[in-house]
Structures are given as structure tokens and as C-alpha cells.
Image (cartoon, grey):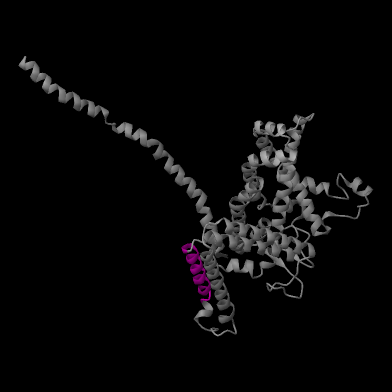
Amino acid sequence: MEAKRDTAQVSVPVTERDAADAAKPSLFDRLEDLAPTLLLWPAVIIVLFLAIFPLFVSLYLSLSRVQLVRGGYEIEFIGLNNYERLLRGSGSRNFLGRWFDDAPNFLGLEGQPTSIGWVLLATLAAFMLYMLVSHIRRSNMPVLRMGGGSGTVVVLGVVSWFIVNFLVAEEGAMAGTWFEEQYWLLTVIPGLVVIVSSVMLGLFNLLLRVVIVVTMMALAYLTAITLGNDGLPGALVVTMIFVFAGVTIQYLLGLGLALLVTQNLPGKRFFRVVFLLPMMITPVGIGFLFRMMTDTVKGPFAPLFKAAGLTDFTWVDSAFGARTAILIGDTWQWTPFMFVILLAALEGVSTEPIEAALVDGANRWQMFRFIVMPEIIPVSITLILIRLIEAFKIIDLPRVMTFGGPGTATESVTYYAFNQWKASATSIGFATAVAYMLLIVVTFFSLVLVNIARRRLLEFTG
């Protein structure tokens, strides 16, 4: 009995130890658990490298000058000279435009908007001011604190502008001194002070919205004066015309067609297929198609143009006609994309609220505004964002239909960068700077759409 008791006492600890050892994961199990991570991170790193490396290389090229030398090429770092040439130098004419009015306006630019331009500017200014005031009213910060922070921003901005434009000018008190070459410090340091003070006072969001409002108004004013009397818009304005006019028309047409197809109309399945046909044609093919269709002499619609008395008419005789022809082709190509996505969104709208609204006596407009539109807003914002980014890169139709003409009336930013790159190898840096300016503009409008337009649309429909 004692021997059996001793054996039992000895065997119990051995059994517990074996169980504990068996519960521990083996080396093979650990490697099996780490396998997804070990395989995932290299793929993530490779994808990030392939996505970011070209971005940094192109950024360096935009700050450099490429020169052909014997046996190869040489890259010389020149800083912001390409951007200065684009905004203030010889490239500003093609990028920003030119004004021919002899009387300078209050911004120092030569040229004045037309009456319609002034009306549109006033409308946009009122809308931007309303958005800014609404943001201030929604904030919970004290009025004095907000006023003090805003006053600080304004005062520092005025002081910075005064120093740069007067003290370091050629006739200024600091001309010929160290400040003349390092004058950029006088703008960077106050700007940093403004940012720090805004963050400390909790006014960063307000400052960001002020910057957005000022930038939007500056771009709108640039568009108005270049499209005004004797104005000549640059590639940036031409691109914004294609983007905002085209995307707006395409969204409205796509939404209207989607609403029609969702109704109980005869032959709606046939129209669903027909509306998708333009998406199956390449952009270059659409360019050649509309180039032939707009030909009033040899095109397929030449008899119709002749019957209408337009035998001596060509679309490229005027800038307006050429841009209209490109907008028609672009709308025909991309409206089906809007139609397909919006149709799927409309078919996903729940029917119970609509039926309840019909019982309560709501009309079609009320049901669309308060039931349908709030449900398709997220899809609409994403759809417009995707189309906005794609529209800023337009090059196929201007290249094929008008070659950027008449003159540079239909030359987009992408087409302008392509022409600069094609001109010579020494223009690669300048062409890259143009592309980066387009990246900045696209990023700005995308952030505005995501952070502001969605909120305003939700408030409108709510």
C-alpha cells in the first residue's frame, strides 16, 4: 500500500508537467501563426514603395532642370524656379491666362469680368460667406476668443504683406541687403506664427475654412477675368470649365435617366443596355467620332448642317464652340458611368418609407428630397469625387478633336504638361511641375468636396 501511495504521489506531478508542456504552442505552431504577417508585410512594403517612390522622384524632377550631356543627361537642382516660371514667368500665360484690359483692377491684375461674371462672383461670394458664418455659429468657442484669434491672423497677414512688398522691394529700405535675398523668411515666419496661434486658440478649422474660401474666390475671379472681355484663359481655367460644367451636366443627366429607368416604362431593359454603349468605346475613338460628327463639310451630319444654313460654320472657329464640342463628347462618354452607379443606388432605396409617404399624401418632389436623396447622397459624393479626379486629367478629347485649339482655348493642364514634355528633354522638370500643380488643385477640390459639400448636402436634404 505504501509503495502504491508513493507511486501515485510521484506520478501526479509528472502528469501535470506533461499537460503544461502539451499546452504550450510548438515552434511549428508559432511559425504558422506568424506566416500571414510574414507574407503580408513584404507585400505591403512593396506596394507602398511602388506607390510612393515615383511620387518622390517626380517631385525631385519638378525641382530640377534636366540637361542633355555627352553620353547621357544631367539633373541640376534649381529649387522652386519651375514653379515660379509657371506662376509668374513665361509659363503663366499658358497656365493661368492673360488679361488685356489696360486698367488694372483692385488686385493689380489687368482685366475686368463681364456682367455675368460679376453676378456669378457675387453669388459664389455670398455662398462662401454663408458657409463661413454657419461654421462660426456652430462652433462652441467664445466670441472674444474667436475674434482675438481672427484679429491675430489678419494683423500678422497684413504685416507680412507690408514687409515683403515694401521693405524688400527694389526701392525699399532693405534693398541690397541680406533681407533682399532671404525675403522668403519674412513670409514663412509670420505664417508659422499664424498657424501656431490658430492651433493654440482652437481656430485651426476656422483658418482652414478661410483659406478654402479665399482660394475658391481667387480661382473664381481668375476664371471670370480670363473669360471676360478680351480675356484669354489658361490651361487651369480651361480644365476647371471641363470639370465643373461636365461633371454637373453628367450627374444631372445620369440621375434623370436613372429615375426614368426605375419607373414602370415599356422597354426600360432595352434602354439600360443602350445607355451603356458609350462606356464600351475608347476615349480616342470617341474623340474621332465626335470630330467627324462636328465636321460641317464631310461629316455624316453635313447635310443637316447644310439644311440649317451652317455650311460655313465650324466648331473650332470660336473658343466657345470648341469647348462646347468637347463637353458634348465628354458628356456622351461619361453619363453612362453616372447612370449605372445611380441606378444601383436608386434600386437599393427602401420602399417602406416611400409607401408611407404616399399614404400621408406626399408628392414626388417631397419624396425625392426627403427620402430618396438622403439615401443616395453617400453614393453621389463618392461618384462625383471619382469623376472629378478623372475629369481633371482630360487629354484625349482635346488632343484628338481640336489639338488644343483654336490657339490654346481647349488646352487642358494635362495636355499642356504633355506638350511641354514633348517639346524637349530640358522641359521635363517644367512639365513635372505642371503635373504637380494639377495634383495640388485636384487634392484641394477633393478635400473641399469631401469635408464641406457632403455636410452641406446633408443639411439641405435634412
Q: In terms of image quadrants, where is residue 229? A: bottom right
Looking at this rendering, what residue extends furthest in the top direction? 1
* Viewer-proximal residue among 97 and 131: 131
* Residue at image coords 49%, 45%: 47
Q: Is residue 415 left or right of residue 174?
A: right
* Residue at image coords 63%, 64%: 214
* Residue at image coords 69%, 42%: 369
* Viewer-proximal residue among 351 and 265: 351
Residue 165 location, x and y as percent?
A: 59, 78
* Viewer-proximal residue among 198 and 227: 198
Q: Main secondary structure of the magenta part?
A: helix
Give the answer, above or below, for where 260 lies relative to 121. above
Q: Is residue 78 visible?
A: no
Is 193 in the magenta?
A: yes
Span colored in magenta:
182-200
Looking at this rendering, what residue extends furthest in the front direction? 360
Q: How many numbered discs?
A: 0
Give the answer, above or below, for where 180 lies relative to 358. below
The quarter of the rendered structure image containing the N terminus is top left
Is 29 in the magenta?
A: no
Residue 424 location, x and y as percent?
A: 64, 62
Q: Is residue 359 left or right of residue 430?
A: right
Q: Is residue 111 visible?
A: yes
Give the answer, above or below, for where 190 lies relative to 18. below
Q: In terms of image quadrants, where is residue 43? A: top left
Residue 250 location, x and y as percent?
A: 73, 46
